[in-house]
């Protein structure tokens, strides 16, 4: 995994809109990452790319209220120009969206998609690939439908680019965990701005 900070602008805000059209941003980011991705067997080559952005993402150009959290094309892993996704950075919850969008790249449909009808249980609970995060979502595991489609995708050989041995492993040199590098209050500041602090009632004794 490689993390790159860029000032590159992907897409434009349309008149009357509060954000950028997600499809437009995804298209431009996918083109950018393809241009900047060296061929294999370069150690700098990546199989998939993800853009984490603070921009508001809109479902449609010119949309006034923009609440899209991410976007990716279905089953595009190992396709050089489209093995990519975009996710709005809204703090810790973005982790669920990242898993969700990478799931799409690995060919997982939404849990309420017609393709998943035969896998649903009576509880109606959706998992990582739920179309939205709400009280009926359990985003800590994959549904049976997700497991079926990702297994089918991998066994068909569509994601064989993932089988390459990495040239080096990523290891934290000091052995510290992310929560030790960034305190609760620092994480609040990163999401909500300088001076933000964790809510006292969220801290357990």
Image: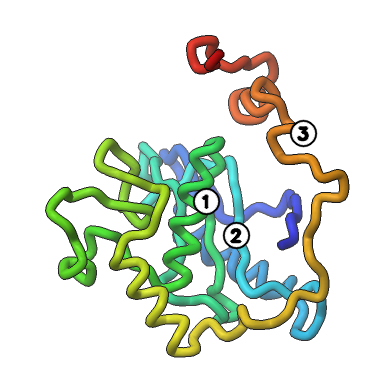
Q: Quadrant of residue 4?
A: bottom right
- CA gap between label 1 and label 3 equals 23 Å
Badge 3 or badge 2: first in the primary sequence: 2
Q: Which residue is most to the top? A: 200
Give the vertical position of 119 relative to 178 (above or below): below
Q: Is residue 177 among the parts visible in the rendering?
A: yes
Q: Residue at 60%, 30% (x, y): give it.
A: 191
Of residues 109 and 149, the one nearer the viewer is 149
Residue 106 vs residue 80, the one in the foreground: 106
Q: Residues within 10 Å of mark 1 (few under 14, many from 20)?
A: many
**Of callouts 2 and 1, the N-terminal one:** 2
The quarter of the image holding the N terminus is bottom right
Q: Which residue is mark 3?
A: 181
On the image, the x and y values in percent for residue 167 come to 81, 75
Query: Which is more foreground, mark 1 or mark 3?
Result: 3
Secondary structure under badge 1?
strand
- Label 1 sits on residue: 87
Upstream in sequence: badge 1 or badge 3: 1
Query: Relative to residue 116, is residue 76 depicted above or below?
Result: below
């Amino acid at each position: 995994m490689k993390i790159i900070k860029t000032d590159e602008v992907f897409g434009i805000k349309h008149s009357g809109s509060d954000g950028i059209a997600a499809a437009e941003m995804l298209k431009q980011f996918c083109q950018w990452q393809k241009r900047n991705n060296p061929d294999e067997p370069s150690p700098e080559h990546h199989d998939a790319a993800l853009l984490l952005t603070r921009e508001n993402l809109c479902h449609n150009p010119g949309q006034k209220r923009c609440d899209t959290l991410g976007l990716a094309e279905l089953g595009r892993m190992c396709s050089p120009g489209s093995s990519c996704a975009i996710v709005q950075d809204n703090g810790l919850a973005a982790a669920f969206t990242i898993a969700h969008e990478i799931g799409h790249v690995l060919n997982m449909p939404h849990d309420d998609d017609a393709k998943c009808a035969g896998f649903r249980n009576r509880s109606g609970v959706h998992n990582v690939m739920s179309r939205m995060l709400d009280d009926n979502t359990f985003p800590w595991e994959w549904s049976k439908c997700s497991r079926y489609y990702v297994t089918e995708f991998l066994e068909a050989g569509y994601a064989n680019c993932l089988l390459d041995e990495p040239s080096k492993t990523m290891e934290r040199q000091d052995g510290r965990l992310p929560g030790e590098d960034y305190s609760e209050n620092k994480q609040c500041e990163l999401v909500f701005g300088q001076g933000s602090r964790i809510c006292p009632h969220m801290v357990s004794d």
